[in-house]
Amino acid sequence: MQETLIRARRYMLGIRLYQNHQAHRDALYSEYNIPSVFSLGGTRLLDYSPAGISNPIVLVIPSLINKYTILDIEPKHSLLQFLSDKNLRPLLIDWGEPSKEEISFSMSDYVTERLCKVVDFLEQKYPNVPVHVLGYCLGGTLSAALALLKPNSIKSLSLLAAPWDFHADSAEDSSVVETRALFLKQLLMSSMNRDVVVPTETVNSIFTMGNPLHSFGKFTKFSEMPQDSEEAVRFVLTEDWLNDGVPLTLPAARECFIDWYKHNYCYKNKWNINGVCINPENIKQPVLIITGKKDKIVPEKSAIAVSDKAKHISVDTGHIGLLAGQNARENTWEPLVRNGKWIMEN
C-alpha cells in the first residue's frame, strides 16, 4: 500500500512538473520562418531548404492525426533540418485542420485531392528535379497509396513505422478494436447530416484505449528527470505534440478505424481508390522501411507487411523514439540517409 502511494505521488508530481515547465516549441522557433510554397484547403507545403532548388526533393508526409512537429521537434533535434543539411530538399506536408472543402474527406480523398495534387504541383514547379517520398506512421500508409497512384512521378518510397497489417502480431486486442468501432459508430449515428469533425481529444482517447497505463509510467519517469536536462525538455515538447493533435473528419475516421483497424482492408488488398487496388506488391519504386523494435503502436510485423522486397532497418526504440528519441540521429536519421542514398539519387 505504501509503495502504491509513493508511485501515485510521483505520477502526480510528474504531471505538475509538465504543466509548469517552461519549455515551449513556439518560443524555440520564434526566429525561424519556414515558407509555404503551396496550399490547398487546410493543407500547406512547407519548404525546409528553399535555397536548394535543384537538390532532390524529399516529400515528407506525417500522420494525418498528429501535427508534423514531431519531425521538427526543436531546432537542434530536427529530422527535417538534418535532411536539408545532407543536401536534400525536404518539403513537408502540413495537414492543418480540415477546411470546409475537406470536411467530407476520407483518407482516400486526402491521397487523391491533396497528395496527388502536391506531386502535380512539384512536377510543374520544379521540372526535372527528382521527388522521393518519406512517410511517417499513418502518413506512410497514405504514402504507399501515393506511390501506386503516381508511379512515374515518385522515385522512391521510405516508410518510418507505417502500419499496413493492422492485425499483425496481435497488436490490438479484439475487445479494443471492437470498442473503437462501436465508439465511432455511435459518433457517426449522432452526427448524421452534420458537418463535424472528430475532436483531437476523442481521437487521442481512441488510440489510448489499448494502453491505459502508459501515461502513468511516462509521467512517473519524467518526475525523476533533472528538469533542465535535454531529456526533460524533449519530453515536454513531445507531450505537447501528443496533446495538440489534428481533428479528423468523420469519413477519414470511419476509413481508418473501421476499414483499416477493424477489417484490415490494407493488408487484405481491399483498399481501392478510384478503381485502383492499393496493393503494395505493385509498387514499382524501391522501398525502404524503418521500424522500432519496441514500437507498441505500429509493431514491426505490421510495418514490414507492406513489402517483402523492401530494405528493412530495425531500430531498438519505440514509435516516437524513431524521430524524437535521444539517439534518433544515430539510430534512425543517419541510417535513413546512409541506407537510402542509393534511393535518394538523381
Image (tube, rainbow, N blue to C red):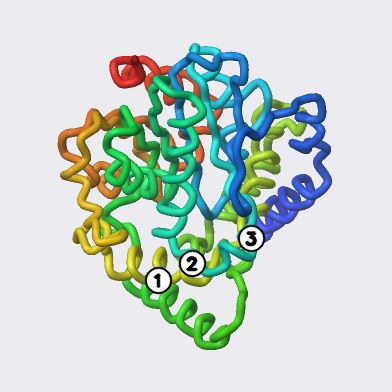
Residue under numbered circle 1: 176
Camera-near label (1 vs 3) is 3
At which x and y percent is residue 164? 29, 51
Q: Secondary structure at mark 1?
A: helix
Which numbered disc flags the more N-terminal residue, 1 or 3?
3
Q: On screen, 226 above or below 246?
A: above
Question: Quick one: label 2, few (<14), some, or many (20+) residues within 10 Å?
Answer: some
Question: Quick one: label 3, few (<14), some, or many (20+) residues within 10 Å?
Answer: some
At which x and y percent is residue 132? 38, 28
Q: On screen, 104 above or below 84?
A: below
Question: Quick one: label 1, few (<14), some, or many (20+) residues within 10 Å?
Answer: some
- The Cα–Cα distance between marks 2 and 1, rounded to whole angstroms, is 6 Å
Q: Determine which of the numbered discs, if any, sits on residue 99 in the image.
A: 3
At which x and y percent is residue 201? 63, 65
Q: Secondary structure at mark 3?
A: loop
The residue lying at 74 percent from left, 28 percent from top is: 33
At which x and y percent is residue 307? 20, 41
The residue lying at 79 percent from left, 51 percent from top is: 16
Q: Secondary structure at mark 2?
A: loop
User: Quick check: marks 2 and 1 in contact, CB under 8 Å?
Assistant: yes
Residue 128 found in image quarter: top left
Q: Nearer the viewer, residue 166 or 341?
A: 341
In this rendering, does residue 219 appear at all? Answer: yes
Camera-near label (3 vs 2) is 3
Residue under numbered circle 2: 209
Q: Amino acid at mark 1?
A: Val
Q: Amino acid at mark 3?
A: Ser
| Relative to 130, 222 lies left or right | right
Screen quadrant of the N terminus: bottom right
